[in-house]
Structure formats: structure tokens, C-alpha cells
Amino acid sequence: MTRKQLIEQIQTKKSYLCVGLDTDIKKIPAHLQSHPNAVFEFNKQIIDATQDLCIAYKLNTAFYEAMGVKGWQAMEDTVKYIPKNQFIIADAKRGDIGNTSTQYAKAFFETMDFDAITVAPYMGEDSVRPFLAFENKWAIVLGLTSNAGSKDFEQLKVVGHATNNSDVDPATNNSKEYLYESVLKKVSSWGTDENLMFVVGATKASDLLGIRKIIPEHFLLVPGVGFQGGSLAEVSKYGMNKDCGLLVNASRAIIYAGEKEDFANEARAIAKQYQTEMAGYLS
Amino acid sequence: MTRKQLIEQIQTKKSYLCVGLDTDIKKIPAHLQSHPNAVFEFNKQIIDATQDLCIAYKLNTAFYEAMGVKGWQAMEDTVKYIPKNQFIIADAKRGDIGNTSTQYAKAFFETMDFDAITVAPYMGEDSVRPFLAFENKWAIVLGLTSNAGSKDFEQLKVVGHATNNSDVDPATNNSKEYLYESVLKKVSSWGTDENLMFVVGATKASDLLGIRKIIPEHFLLVPGVGFQGGSLAEVSKYGMNKDCGLLVNASRAIIYAGEKEDFANEARAIAKQYQTEMAGYLS
């Protein structure tokens, strides 16, 4: 999917909601547990009930991998089932040396028809670029995440050569920025805002302002609204740009909203709440 | 597998060779291409021909994922086939927020019976610790990798509070170390040398000396000997400790040594060269 097509979907549906299909077979309604393809059946009903309210679906591959071959099959089936006007994200956080990253890209962009994959940046440029070599496909690179461990490395100050960074230490003439800021700056130079996005947790408004100074145009995937906390209002206020520029994910709050036979309706009700609020911010 | 058991295998077989089963169906011998389970058949023959010369096998999941469900099945079959006295590594470079990392751990430690999984540290403590919650299982965390991109983030200097680090900037009293050194220090405090290892590329001898000062006891997985360059002699000289402490991987140099029906014998010959050299360094 191109950036233009994504923006059109957001404007048409008045939504920047991404529904996270992090489907754990232990958590789906009891009446589905004995279904031969329980996870795919669950996903189908969630998709049917929400696809007019969202513009993206995100599958965290860990939940499917935990089920082995059956899980990988359920993931393939789900991706084929999702309507093609949806932006489909493999939340896989992959990354490896060049030729291996190319294999990951093939797995998710060719063998399966995802539009985008989340990528971990630790190993640097030659681990990220292979994901950018596929037409109309996107790499969504980890930037600042909202989990407690983001303080361990992402929020370390790093020292680089002074460039245009105003945060310069006069004693050493070295610029000091957070590691995640260095990631945003460097990674964004390896692609464009038409094949790169960044994962930014629903964190403090002040962080979002700083991030938007670095990457004003790139789309941000915000994974943590709902059970992970973080306010949709704040994220939208400080993170939106003229093209919206946000994909806000909600998983557990939506897909586990209901526990009984009407679980899909319950899920729809929660998705509708998100979309209604988002429509307000978009106008 | 426990650390003690691993050390016994190294001493018994006089080897610290890890054979990398990064099996690309496009690269295996022509006569196998039409086999209904070509990748698994190839792996079986490689395993049969090398298992007395090595103490570990490493599967890079990307190559299997690229083949879709059939690939994941080939990976499951291969893990089941590998003799149980081998240390089996999922080179998956996984990492995500807590409950998701737990799903990854289940995928590789329970649904499949790998001994270890490589882990990407970017998201910090709560993304790594879940892998340490499984008895006799190991997390092998990325430290310093040998690809060109290691300079982008791993080799940035980070500023932290002065501890025992002698590399202190007198102007600011802040210690400056490389990001990868911070990773080694912090991550090693989250586990022990009986459930944690680190990926260290076959890089400069001076880097290895510095790394061994930080983590003298932990095993290092060295992925890059063979086609990726790096000298086995140097890595062994500067990286070994009294328990050996090294797992040195070779993939393409071994598994693609031969192109014809006798490819497994050719693979064995290369593995034998490695093992012979290693036996010399172990004594």
C-alpha cells in the first residue's frame, strides 16, 4: 500500500485505528476453544466486526509462533482474509545481517502479503535497509517504546559528533541525545516517509513533541493505547501532522472485550468508541 | 542443557563448533531440489555427517520463515532430529514487551525444544527477562555484532553515571562506554552465566579483550567465522576462558561446501578442519 492510499483510507473511514490481532488461544471465548481452527475463526469474526472502523490490522507473530505450525498457518490464513484495503502489519520486530534480513522481508512481504513489518534497529543500517527494497512495502522501526525497559538503552544519552543538534556540550563540543533520537535521525536517512515508519509508545507529550521535531512527516505506529495505558487524546494532539501521521493500535481492549458468543459485537463496540473519538480529532 | 553439560560436551568432543543450518532451498544441491521435504532432507544429511564433530547447531529462523508453513515444519522436524546431546540454538533475535517475549520463549522452548534463543536487547530488561524464566534454557543476547552496521548504534558512546568505569570524563564525571558495553554490563546483571550468553562477532582482538574484562565467565556465541571473515585463531586466543566459553558458528562454509550428491561428505571435511584446529586450542 502506498502512503497516498493509506491517507485516503484514513480520510474515508475517519479512523487511524489499528486492531491488534494478538490472539492467544487461552484467552478466546470458551465456545470457540474446540473449533478445529479456533484462532483463525476468532480472527475472522473480529475482522468482520471491525473492518469498517479501522484502517489497519497488526498481528504480533509471537502469539502465532507459540502455537507452532498450526499458528503459522493461522497467521497465513488471517492475512489472506483481511480485506485488501487494510494496512496489514507483521509485528515481528525482526532484524539481522543483510542477507538474513532479506529472508525475513521475503517471509512477510512475498510468502505472506503483509504491507509492513516492525524492525529492531540494534544491528544498524545493513540490517534495516533490506526491508526497504520492496515496492509499496514498509519497515516500521522501533524508536521509543513505552515499556519500563525503554530506560535501559533507548533513553541512554549517546555522544556523537556535533551536527545541527542544539544539545551540544560546550566542554567537549559533542552533541548528546537519547539513543532513540539517534535511531530516529539515522534510520530516517536510510529511507523516505513513503517506506519508513517508527514505533513510538504512547508516552509523555513532551517526548512526542521532541520526536515530531526530528521526524515531522513520518507515520508513527503507537502500540500502547488501551491496556498499556497512554491517552489517545494526548497522542493525537501532539503526534498528528497534516496527513494524520498516526496508526494507533489497540489489541486486548478490543479483541477480549467480550467473552461469550457475542464477543465480536463487544469488540465492535470498543472499536467504535475509538473510531468516534478519532473522527473528532481528524476533523 | 546445563552449563556443566555443555562444557562436558566440549571436552569430550574436543570441539566448540556450532554448525549453522541456515538452509536456503535455492542453494542446496540440485539433486535434492525435487525432494518433497528438501530442506529437512538436506539438514538430516548435514547433521548425520557432522554431529560427532560439533557440539551445537544453530537455525536462523529467517530462512525457514521465508518458506512459510512448510519452512516452519522443516524447522520443527530438524530440531526433533538433532541428537539431544547437541546444544540447539534458535537464531531468531527476538524481543518484545514482557508478555510477548514470554510467547516467543514458549514458541522456542516449549512448542519446539531449542536449548537457546538469540535475543535483541533494544527494548531493555522487561523484554529480556522472560527468556530467563525457563529451566535449563538460555538467552543469547546481541552484544557486539560484526556487520558494518554495528557502528551505527552498538559502537556509539553512551553517557551514564560514573560507577567503577575507569573511562570517566573528568569534565563531567560521567563514564563513557560503548552502547554494546552497556548492554553487556546491564544484561549480565539480569541473569547468570548459567542462563545467559552473548553474541559477539569475530571482530578485533582488542574488542574481545575489553569484552572479556566485562564478562569473563559468560559463553560467547561467535557467528562470523568462515564466509563472514574473522580468524578462529584470534577469537580463540582472546575469547577463551577456563571453561572454553566459546561457541563458534560456521554456516555457509560448511553446509554449502559441496554441490553434488556427496555434499554431506564435503561438509564433514570442512567441519573436521574446524574441529581439528579447535582441538589444538583446547589442549
Image (cartoon, coloured by chain):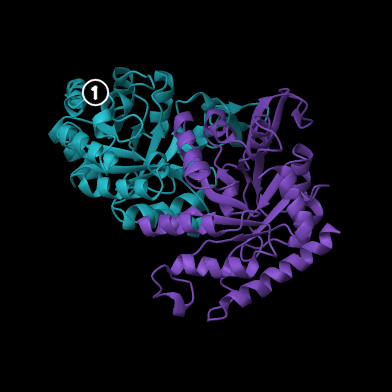
Chain colours: A purple, B cyan
Residue A229 in sight from this viewpoint: yes
Residue type pointed to by label 1: Gly
Quadrant of the drawing holding the N terminus of chain A: top right
Q: Could you tell me residue A239's position as x and y percent? A: 77, 50
**Residue at image x 47%, y 54%?**
A76
Left or right of residue A146, residue A170 in this image: right
Pointer 1 indicates a residue of which chain? Answer: B
Residue B121 in sight from this viewpoint: no
Q: Could you classify mark 1 by the number of other residues whose Cα lies within 10 Å: few (under 14), some (14-19), or many (20 or more)? A: some
Left or right of residue A143, residue B16 in this image: left
Nearest to the observer: residue B180 or residue A172: B180
Left or right of residue A201, residue A68 in this image: left
**Residue at image x 39%, y 37%?**
B198
In the picture of the structure, the residue carrying the numbered disc 1 is: B258
Q: Could you tell me residue B76's position as x and y percent? A: 30, 50
Left or right of residue A93, residue B271 in this image: left
Tag 1's secondary structure?
loop
Nearest to the observer: residue A41 or residue A253: A41
Nearest to the observer: residue B162 or residue B79: B79
The quarter holding residue B239 reads top left
Q: Could you tell me residue B256's position as x and y percent? A: 28, 26
**Residue at image x 23%, y 50%?**
B80
The quarter holding residue A135 reads top right
Q: Could you tell me residue A185's position as x and y percent? A: 69, 33
